[in-house]
Amino acid sequence: MRGLTMLRTKGGIPVIRHHYSADPARDPDINPEWKEKERRKYTSQAAWDREQEIVDNAGGGELVLADALVTYWKKIVIEDPRWRPDPEWRMEAGFDHGRANPTSLERSYFDFDETIYLCGEYYQPGREIWEHAIALKEMADIGKLDTCYADPSIFPLNAQANVPTRKDERAKSLNEIYVENGIEIFSPFHGDHSDISFGERVLMHWRDLDNREPTLKIVCRNFSESPQPGLHNWDCPNLLWEMMRMRRVKLTAQQLLSRNTSEAIVQKDNHALDAAKYLVMSHPEPTRKPLG
């Protein structure tokens, strides 16, 4: 039967593979419109191949968010230089501290329908906490934040703590040093730390964009193909740059025998992504809004 195949394991157990083409209403030779319409609901070819074409190793080396961004850029990215958030919208942020790597804060606004607008960021490598604190104090609306979710590793004394320089000094957590420098806004993130989960959550906000508006938008009027360190009061160019580069780990044929390709994201250029992850993953999955 078309669309159905059966294999047997070495132990003789039958395994049936049921492809969508077994259903005449979904058979591309009979009803090509179904595949064309259904494919638009997926944000990447790899996602379609894994779920509909039953290709288990689809997605190795795949760019996770770039396909959706390029396809629906005008819907996801706000480029109007006049755009500003409503003063009544709720404000939250995510924060990722780095040393040699960039320290990043991503600020967001939630409208009355709970759509997230990532609008404003601080992104700066290679500075001391007191220098970051000075810059963060200059960020627009920083004093109006309801909360700022941060990597929990900055809170304990036994993780990334500073080393006392005198006998009468004690070790301090990174958060305590920020507080001493006037930045008392961080709360530990307690959600799912998985980069894969974060990528899937973002794509849930961007599903079926031919028929609906995204529930997560990014404000950026100054996108560039390279990082733009510094304070960006009303734009997120570094977050968008990292989103365009977010990629799954490409596994060798031998690794594919023992690992699931969906379990790993390349750990590079992900500092703004981590800050955004702490924010986005602190909230429930987006609801499925009705069409129209």
Image: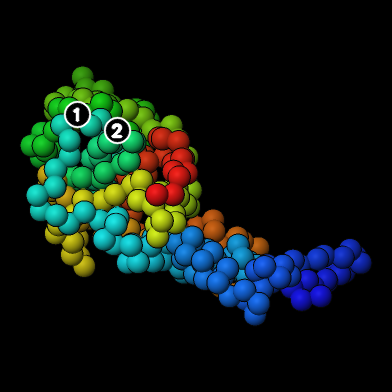
* Disc 1/disc 2 C-alpha distance (Å): 9 Å
Pointer 2 residue: 112
For the point 43% across and 32% down, the residue is 190
Whole-percent x and y of residue 223? 18, 61
Pointer 1 residue: 88
Along the horizontal axis of the image, is 213 left or right of 41?
A: left
Whole-percent x and y of residue 226? 20, 65
For the point 66% across and 77% down, the residue is 30
Of the numbered discs 1 and 2, the one sitting upstream in the chain is: 1
Q: Residues within 10 Å of mark 1 (few under 14, many from 20)?
A: few
For the point 21% across and 19% down, the residue is 168
Total numbered circles: 2
Against 93, residue 209 (above or below) is below
Three-letter code for the amino acid on which mark 1 is drawn: Glu
Against 209, residue 287 (above or below) is above
Whole-percent x and y of residue 13? 89, 63
**Quarter of image, res 1:** bottom right
Q: Residues within 10 Å of mark 2 (few under 14, many from 20)?
A: few
Identify which residue, 180 or 183, lies in the foreground: 183
Q: Residue furthest right?
A: 12
Tell me, yes or no, if residue 92 can be seen here. Answer: no
**Quarter of image, res 145:** top left
Whole-percent x and y of residue 158? 37, 30
